[in-house]
Image (cartoon, grey):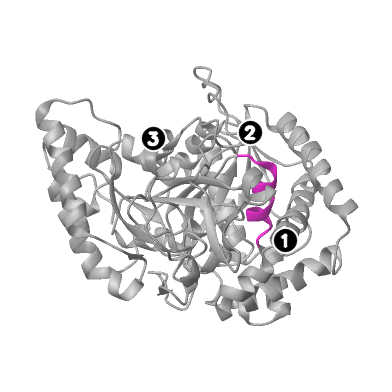
Amino acid sequence: MESQNPAAEPWQRSALDLAAAIRTREVSAVEVARSCLARIEATNPRLNALFDIRPDEVLADARRADEAVTAGDPLGPLHGVPVSTKINTDQRGHVTSNGVAALAGPPAKDDAACVAALRRAGAVLLGRSNAPAFSYRWFSTNDLHGRTLNPWDADRTPGGSSGGAASSLAAGMTPLAQGNDIGGSIRYPAACCGVVGVRPTVGRVSNWAPPVYVDTPGGPTRLDFPLTAQACAVEGPLARTVADARLALHAMTTPDLRDPFGVPAVPARQGETPRPRVALVRDIGTVGNHPAVDRALDTAAARLAEAGYDIEEFAEPSLIAEAARIWSLLLYEDFRGMVPFVEQVGDEDIRTSLTYSFAAAAAVWGERPTLEAYIQGWARRGSLIARLQELLGQDRLLLTPVAAELPFEQDADLAGPARAAELLAAMWPMAAVPILGFPAVSVPALLAEGLPVGVQLIAGRFAEDLALDAAQTVEDAAPRLAPAC
């Protein structure tokens, strides 16, 4: 699907290529927007990945982008490049439904900080991407907007919660997408759909958004985000190539002190560094991998070794195991307070998934973990972060699966408590990283059983470029994956 050939349709070209072509007037932003809109018309009716697409608004923004080029105005790195935004993220003039009818109130008055950053970079915002209700599941279906399909296999999840973003990218509807991640919601959909997903270091991309109010019998009540959402959730890009993901990440980087975990400045990369060592974490002793997952790890490791990376076994996989285990404590206990509201306004799928997910967590922590266990979980988190940063520094990466299984069958989390527990165990690579706050990149490695299989590269804090460099090496040696759609 991807091509740098100027004769290719604009929707087939990379974001990096499009930005350069628009800047030099080889192609207009309007031509690019029309090409993407036509691609959406051709593929979205089947996939249901994007909605709230307003062609007149998109084309007006594209015309303004072209006028800026003609006038010689300063141009941002994404000038004229289409980008989708997610339904749980505020975009001025659009509803932030989060897949829940009760939250589909008036349009947002302001952009979330990450969306504002995309605008400043010159992006043309093109449609809203689907997600599960409350962006909670590893699947992307809800009663408000329906089910998003994986363009590789309709019977498999496109991932969640940024499933609409990943599905639309794989189908060529947009070259870039915005997503967010607290338990794999960028990295897992990217792997399921054969694209690239970047989870930045906590604080690098602002997580600030306008306050959320919900209607209650006593009047509008402000909905404050729980501590895990503040300390572990991030905004980040999805893209069809590593180079595009890097471009979008740097455009979205927004030091913002309104974000309680935001940083005032991102540490600069200190010149050229020797190739980092890569420590392989094949599993954490809790669940076996599908053979194709092991093959993807072996393939990625071989490509990195051929490029001069030293490959070794990670000496302390127990750190990752403990982080994944703590995720199931802190996240679910923080979410427990929202359960009555979710049960009141959520759809049947989210209520069922929530019930089975809590049962899976209870098998690890007990039916009702104590306050002491919760407090100790946060304390232990700090110690794990410090230890892993010591081990990684700025010159080592971890190579892990994205999940122990191939993309899950649709609605696997609704099949019963036993299957929900299997999913939680399989997703240890997605759960461990948010608790630690480290950056990670999901990149496709191979195709197996007609499905893309990705690997994850984890770097030290604010060392995203190291992980992206390694992901580029994996991508360069891989055949480009494109679904037949």
Q: Depth check: give the residue in front, 465 or 201.
A: 201
Pick whichever of labels 2 and 3 is earlier in the sequence.
3
Secondary structure found at label 3? helix
Residue 91 locus on image (x, y percent): 37, 51
The residues bearing labels 2 and 1 have C-alpha atoms spaced at a distance of 26 Å
Pick whichever of labels 1 and 3 is earlier in the sequence.
3
Q: Which residue is mark 1?
A: 332
> Is residue 436 one of those drawn in magenta?
yes
Residue 72 locus on image (x, y percent): 13, 25
Majority secondary structure of the magenta segment? helix
Q: Relative to residue 229, is residue 285 drawn left or right? A: right
Q: Name the amino acid, label 3.
A: Ala
Q: Name the amino acid, label 2.
A: Gly
Secondary structure found at label 2? loop
Secondary structure found at label 1? helix
Q: Which residue is mark 3?
A: 251
